[in-house]
Amino acid sequence: MMTSAIPDGVKLEEVDCPMGCPRDDEVVLVGRDRLHDLPGEYSIVRCRRCELMRTTPRPSADTIGFYYPDSYGPYATTRVQDDAAATGPASSGRFARLWPALFEPKTHALPPLEPGRALEVGCGSGSFLHSLALRGWTVEGIEFSATAAKAARALGYPVHCGSLEQAPPPGGPLDLVVGWMVLEHLHEPIAALRKLASWSAPGAHLVASVPDAAAPEFRVFGEDWYALHLPAHLFHYTPRTLRALLAAGGWTVQRLLWHDNPNNLLLSLDHRWRARGHTVRADLARAMAAGARWPRARFVLGNLMGATRTAGRLTVWATRT
C-alpha cells in the first residue's frame, strides 16, 4: 500500500474501514489521477469482513483540494446558462465538454415528491438547485469549491462553502437530500449520513448516485476504469456495501436504479487505448461518449447496459430510518 510521487503539500492519512471492522484488508489495485494527470499513486483496498473498498492512504480533508482544480468538470458544467430558463449545464474545457453527457435526465431521477425543503450536497455551480427551485422547492446547497459555490450563490441560493462535515444546519427540517456522485468523495461517510439524517424530517428522502464497483467494467479495466477517479474517490461502493453504509448512517434503501449511460465503458476504453498508444481508437471512444459520433449506437448501448445493470453507475433512493 505504498504511494509514490505525492505532491508537496498533500498530507496522507491511513484509514481503517468505517464500518468498524478489524483491519483485515486486501489490496485491489494501485492507480493514479487520470482526469487531470496530477501526480501521486494511490491504493484501493477491500475489507475482507464487509467488502467495502476504500482508498488508503489518502489525502487528508484539508489537502485533498489539490485534486479538485477549478477545471474539474462538474464545476463548469453545473453552471446555469445566462438565460435563467436554461435547464442544461454550460460547457467549457476538455472535461467540461464531456460532463453533460454524464448527467442525463435519468441520472437525476427523483421519487414522486411534493415540493418542500431540499439540500444538495456537492451542488457545484447550482444548475440542479436551480431546477429544483423552478419546481417549487426551497433549496440550499453545500459545495467544496469556492469558485463553484460563488456561482451558485449568484443565482440567489444559500450555499455553504466547505465540507459537509463542517456545514451548519439548514434553515429547517429537510424533506429531500440529494447528492450526485458525492458519497464516494466523503472522508467520513457514516458520520456525514448521520448528520444529514439528524437534519431531516420523518419520512425524508435521500437520493444519491455513485459509481457501481460491482459492475463488470471494474473487473475488466482495473486501474483504467474511468469511475475510479483516484484519489478524489475515497470509497468504491457495490450495491451490497452501499446498503450497509446507508443503514449505518440512519437511512433505509427503498430502490436502486441503474443508469442507461454507457460513458463509463466508453471513457474506460479511452483510458486503456490511450495508455497503449491507440490514439485514434481512444479519440473515437471519447467522441462517442460526448455524443459527437454514433449517437444512436450510444443510445442503444446505454439502454442495454441500464437494462442489464452493467453501466457502472446507479442511483439510490432511501428514507430516514
Image (cartoon, grey):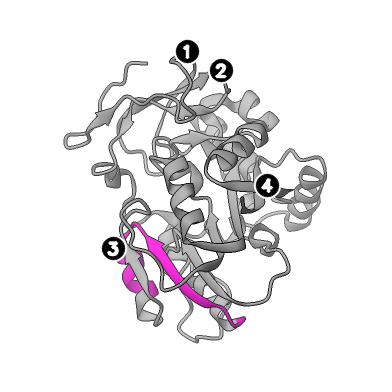
Query: Compared with residue 257, is residue 6 higher up or lower down, i.e. above or below?
Result: above
Q: Amino acid at mark 2?
A: Arg
Q: Amino acid at mark 4?
A: Val
- Verify whether residue 150 appears in magenta: yes
Find disc 2 in the rendering and name its residue.
49
Q: CA distance from mark 1 to mark 4?
A: 27 Å
Secondary-structure class at tag 4:
strand
Q: CA distance from mark 3 to mark 2?
A: 38 Å
Q: Earlier in the sequence, mark 1 or mark 4?
A: 1
Answer whether labels 2 and 1 touch (C-beta < 8 Å). Answer: yes
Answer whether labels 1 and 4 touch (C-beta < 8 Å). Answer: no
**Residue 299 in sight from this viewpoint:** yes
Residue located 46% across and 39% down the image: 229
Residue 146 - label: 3
Q: Earlier in the sequence, mark 2 or mark 1?
A: 1
Of residue 172 and residue 88, the one placed in the foreground of this image is 172
Find disc 4 in the rendering and name its residue.
253
Instruction: Give percent across and percent down for residue 84.
Output: 50, 85
Secondary-structure class at tag 2:
loop
Specify start and end residues of the magenta stretch as a single range.
Answer: 135-152
Q: Residues within 10 Å of mark 4 (few under 14, many from 20)?
A: some
